[in-house]
Image (cartoon, rainbow, N blue to C red):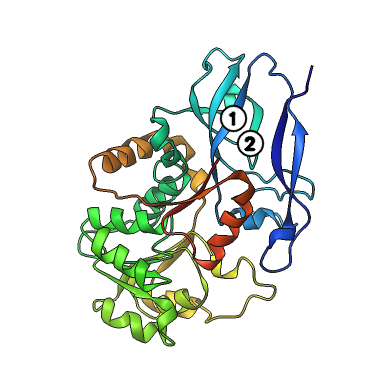
Amino acid sequence: MTTRQSQCWILTGYPEGLPDATTFRLESRPLPEPAAGEVSLEALYLSVDPYMRGRMSPVKSYVAPLQPGDVIAGAAVARVTESKHPDFVAGDLVLAPLGWRTAGVLAGASLQKLALPVERASLALGALGMPGLTAYFGLLDVGRPKPGETVLVSGAAGAVGSLVGQIARLMGCRVVGVAGSEEKVRWLTEELGFHAALNYKAHEDLREALAPLCPDGVDVYFDNVGGAVSDAALGLINLRARLVICGQIAQYNAKNPPRGPRPFATLLVRRARAEGFIVFDFKERFPEAQRRLSTWVDDGRLRVRETVIEGFENVPKAFLGLFTGQNTGKMVAKL
């Protein structure tokens, strides 16, 4: 009998600075037969996310680092091909911690059955998945926006930021986004309903450029990027402002992160709060958020865009594109 195989993308070693094509190696690995309680899967969509860069470092953060030789970890939408678990049958669509593989065998307990049609199943990796949950809890529970307040979002055209801004608008806030191109600025303002947006690449003095877009200051700053954008935002925060620290993509590949303004004096004078969070802090409430997000997507109050890269061979290319702004909305790889 011929042993079944899965194509896998492997971490070759820990990159210094920005990863490149040599960071990943394509391998074929054998697939076992599913045992009792397990399910065989074929991948349909693979997620690529900025947080994965942190796992390509030997330094432990909130999740253990990958080791050289490991399959790159991540979420996938997959189809069940064979099941030895009572909750799944062949043909079911599931959200699975499959990583960058074309197929795999996983415990049924690690899977979430999806009620989405296959043509919309990638939403489980975006607006109805971890990015949507991150936007929902980060803004509503950590940022706590009030109607009439100004919410400033960095990385506003990304998977999380684009949802943060739209949810803030639903909460009755003035929403200002920062993105990396004029095309993204137009998308934010003309399609997503942001009240204003700024292309940070077109301005040397970001605080000066942001100030007229936030004439009443900033009450909630949702930080996806860190770096110079966040330094500028700090100078605009109001009394009792909330700074939601979600990501620092501007620094993920820095060999020697630059020193920016020290924020504590500003936080003291403004009596402001800066709080980091990890979406898994809210795991018990995921069903609540997913129901609400699904309603907003279905009735058009949340608009979603995906950047889809086709082909398993292009998964690393899709991931590297996150760091050069090639995505608008959620980046996914379609197999």
Mark closer to the chain start, 2 or 1: 1
Question: Foreground: 282 or 178?
Answer: 178
Question: Foreground: 50 or 228?
Answer: 50
**Residue drawn at x 42%, y 59% as measured from the top left:** 328
Name the secondary structure under disc 1: strand
In x, y percent, where is residue 37? 63, 16
Tags 2 and 1 in contact by the CB under 8 Å rule? yes
CA gap between label 2 and label 1 equals 6 Å
Residue holding disc 2: 102
Note whether residue 299 is visible: yes
Q: Is residue 269 above or below residue 87?
A: below
Q: Is residue 168 left or right of residue 11?
A: left
Question: Foreground: 88 or 221?
Answer: 88
In x, y percent, where is residue 10? 73, 47
In x, y percent, where is residue 191? 26, 59
**Residue drawn at x 24%, y 48% as measured from the top left:** 301
**Residue drawn at x 70%, y 73% as measured from the top left:** 255
Note whether residue 150 is visible: no
What residue type is disc 2 on? Answer: Thr
Q: Is residue 92 above or below residue 281?
A: above
In x, y percent, where is residue 137? 40, 49
What residue type is disc 1 on? Answer: Glu
Location of residue 28 by image quarter: top right
Disc 2 crowd rating (10 Å Cα; few below 14, some 14-19, many 20+) is many
Q: Check the picture and name the quadrant holding the N terminus.
A: top right
Q: Identify the disc placed on residue 42.
A: 1
